[in-house]
Amino acid sequence: MPLWKRLGFLSVFVVPALMPVAAWLGARTGHAGAMAWFPLFFLFVLVPLADYALGHDPRNPTPAEAASLERDVWFVALTLAALPAQLAVMAWSGWHFANAGFGVGGMLGWLLSQGIVGGVLAINVAHELIHKDTGVERAAGGVLLTSVGYHGFKIEHVRGHHVHVSTPEDASSARFGQSLWHFLPRALLRNTANAWRLEALRLSKQGHSPWSPRNELIGWSALWLAMAALFALKLGLVGLAYFVAQGFFAACALEIINYIEHYGLERRTLDNGRYERTTHLHSWNSDYLLSNFLLFHLQRHSDHHETPRRRYQALLHHADSPQLPGGYAAMFLLALCPPLWFRIVNPRVRAFQAQRAETATASAA
């Protein structure tokens, strides 16, 4: 991998820096409430424009390069560095929120901005870490998820979503024609409940009570309560409200991305009643250079589902995967408006389904 690309992944740390930049702009302009929305403007207006300007990055590493990339500690260090960055910006942002004197519009802008920052820095990075074999990486992923109160994702994503992706059993896979606003509350509730169910099932198979200290979710929940208590102790009820709200918005951001990643895609039912194996044909792919830097190659999601343990720097672009017409930042805005989403994405779903059916017919012949 060329040096410029290795360094390109540092751009993820631009995201937490947007919060102090917004505070500085507010102080300089005297419009703190308006500038509280600046991180959202940067991420959902400037980033998509830059994405389209810089274009695509379809290049894949060779097998030898991929093997070398998998062993490169630079990329591990970047993901682990997200933990102190997330905790620091979350704490500072809470202090600023409690002391900035925002009006209602400024408060909403700041909470939404911090929620999106948490979605990128906490949940997206945790998504990379919880798939890995080392205890340090999985633990760091758990703390990142706990900082936004969505620690059930650590269990449900690996043991639930990756098993049932693109089937009706998966709450994070949106059906064709399902709007985001129908999908979102159901995903939040079902995935949280499913995490507890999966952990209880694991413990039951081992002969333990779901309320034993062996329940991983109890430990993460205790840590979340400790974090919440610390915000309440230091910043009062305003700090507590900030901590809960930023986590809620981060979780919403995650499930909106899940909506984008799997909308309308289905795994076929085989003659034996099982679903076909998950491949790179069951997730939407996007190869835009800048947004893949910002998201540690999350947009090469098709390959991630085919090979979940592959590290982000070695993920592959598959040209035959269903392709999104933009990066996740652009698609995020589109998903918020279901008529526009359906108008742009539904024809792509139909075309991809028709292509798969044609391929299957040709193979059968």
Image (cartoon, rainbow, N blue to C red):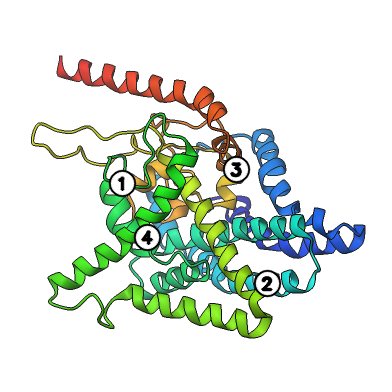
Does 56 appear above or below 145?
above
Outermost residue to the bottom: 233
Q: Mark 2, mark 3: which one is toward the viewer?
A: 2
Q: Which mark is residue 320?
A: none
Does 179 appear above or below 204?
above
Mark 1: secondary structure: loop
Residue highlighted by disc 4: 192
Q: Mark 1, mark 4: which one is toward the viewer?
A: 4
Residue highlighted by disc 2: 94
Sequence-wise first label, 1 or 2: 2
Give the Cα distance between marks 1 and 4: 12 Å
Crowd rating for badge 1 (residues with CA inside 10 Å; few <14, some 14–19, many 20+): many
Question: x and y percent of residue 334 in the render?
Answer: 58, 34
> Which quadrant of the figure has residue 209?
bottom left
Outermost residue to the left: 272
Three-letter amino acid code at disc 2? Answer: Gly
Question: x and y percent of residue 244 in the render?
Answer: 56, 68
Give the Cα distance between marks 2 and 3: 25 Å
Question: x and y percent of residue 167 in the render?
Answer: 27, 40
Three-letter amino acid code at disc 1? Answer: Asp
Residue highlighted by disc 3: 329
Residue at image position (59%, 63%) is 246
Sequence-wise first label, 1 or 3: 1
Crowd rating for badge 2 (residues with CA inside 10 Å; few <14, some 14–19, many 20+): many
Crowd rating for badge 4 (residues with CA inside 10 Å; few <14, some 14–19, many 20+): some
Q: Which mark is residue 170?
A: 1
Give the Cα distance between marks 4 and 2: 25 Å
Three-letter amino acid code at disc 4? Answer: Thr
